[in-house]
Image (cartoon, rainbow, N blue to C red):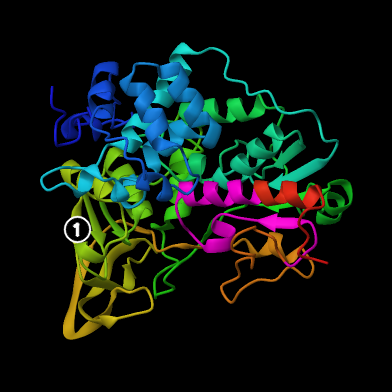
Amino acid sequence: MKPPTKKVPMPEQEPEERIKNFFEVALGYSEEQAIIEARRCLQCPSHPCVSGCPVGIDIPGFIKKIKEQDFTESARILKKYNNLPAICGRVCPQEVQCEERCVVGKIPGSEPVAIGRLERFIADWEATNVKETKSNPTSSKGKKIAVIGSGPAGLTVAADLAKMGYEVDIFETLHKPGGVLVYGIPEFRLPKSIVEREVKYIESLSVKIHLNTPVGKAISVEELLNDYDAVFIGVGAGTPKFMKIPGTNLNGVYSANEFLTRVNLMKAYMFPEYDTPVKKGTNVVVVGGGNVAMDAARSALRLGAKNVIVVYRRTEQEMPARREEYFHAVEEGVKFKWLTQPLRYIGDEKGRVTGVECISMELGEPDESGRRRPIPIEDSRFIIETDMVIEAIGTDANRFLLSQFKGLALNKYGYIVTDSETGATSLKKVFAGGDIVTGAATVIEAMGAGKRAAYWMDKFLNGEYDPWR
């Protein structure tokens, strides 16, 4: 039978149901659906999809085994390259990475193979059907690695180095491991039980995770540099960024970081079972056009907001959010106000936000990002009434931690300067990767940085690579 030209649709909760809960929206493929989708793969010899994957997964290999119904071998192939497949299958932007290069998607009238959905399927199948997933490392090399941060980059570098035979300690400031995976991404996109499952696999490799241990406070940088043979910094970029317009200090104006951390990590949506209060706005304005803005808007809706409006200074075409997340938000009733820039927040006599004064924009010539620059239109000011604003306009580096590393080279934005291929920093035996180097990016890009760093850290520790000579 000829394979379908379109992707097998992903089963999902209906919009009118899912806005009432925080359960996962996408429900995952059945075995039958996964096999049908796997049959769409042409197994092309040049496998361009692999070149689009930051961690270099053997995509044709694991999909071929799904087609053959050998799910165990498919999972083994996947885990060889990716330590967090169930996470990547849910949150990675496959549409602009592996799937964008899929040959099937180049055929007129066809869609690319649903690589991300198949990755999620096989990872979930393995979790349900294979009880022992521990990967036996090579013999111990007798050397110790310190990893700062347990986000995607830190977990990846730790797992890969542990598999090579190194003793790895992860130091995490928060009370749960996972970094942005636990504090930033909502339950309805990435259930925290999935993160816990993936972390347990990494711990099974003998990686030790020290929670509630902020480096620079609970343990000094000097101790790490003295006690470990190499150090990897993977702390992400979690410092909130504000527009700093008048009224920012009004009650009801949040950063997306605080709002999502309360909701996701601290389970505010389950209050009072979890003792974490969070404001539940009625008319909510979210500022920004990325995935974080979509997460904040959709979370506010699930907390009971009657109206949620996303304001973005460019148009839908320039919006950086994944199309899937945008379409889900639209389905759920989130409204979008394009070409709109907030100027100030308006408050009442009690210091509570009551409105956002905005100005309409038009697009001019492209800026350094390649997108057309938004330009204010004269005499176009207007007010949106609101009782809650969430700014989702990006993040900054953790300057306190980085200041503890004396002599560590930073760029003008406060991020760590590294060798782009190896992750080596200006400090001997210190490597870095992920958002603390690139600024806010994707989970899989951070994992790719962790994977490359692990390779070169091994070379350094074996005396085959030393950029600090």
Q: Is 82 placed above or below 246 here?
A: above
Residue 132 in picture, x, y percent from top left:
58, 14
Residue 39 in picture, x, y percent from top left:
25, 27
The residue at 34%/80% (across/down) is 367
Judged from the image, the secondary structure of the residue bearing numbered disc 1 is strand
Viewer-nearest residue: 110 or 337: 110
Hey, which residue is sitting farthest bottom in the picture?
Answer: 378
Q: Looking at numbered disc 1 in the image, what kind of residue is underneath it? A: Phe
Residue 388 in picture, x, y percent from top left:
33, 56
Q: Locate the N terminus and report the quarter of the image it occupies.
A: top left
Hey, which residue is sitting farthest right in the picture?
Answer: 226
Q: Locate the C terminus and report the quarter of the image it occupies.
A: bottom right
The residue at 76%/45% (across/down) is 146
Quadrant in which residue 135 is drawn: top right
Instruction: Answer whether residue 100 is magenta in the image.
Output: no
Position of 419 with respect to 325 (left or right) is right
Position of 161 with respect to 271 (left or right) is right
Q: Is 9 placed above or below 312 here?
A: above
Q: Residues within 10 Å of mark 1 (few under 14, many from 20)?
A: many
The residue at 55%/44% (across/down) is 152
Viewer-nearest residue: 116 or 288: 116
Can the viewer see residue 268?
no
| Residue on which the image places disc 1 | 336
Q: Is 447 placed above or below 276 here?
A: below
What is the span of residues highlighted in magenta in the rendered image? 426-453
Viewer-nearest residue: 185 or 122: 122
Instruction: Answer whether residue 431 is magenta in the image.
Output: yes
Viewer-nearest residue: 189 or 382: 189
Residue 202 in picture, x, y percent from top left:
62, 30
Can the viewer see residue 158?
yes
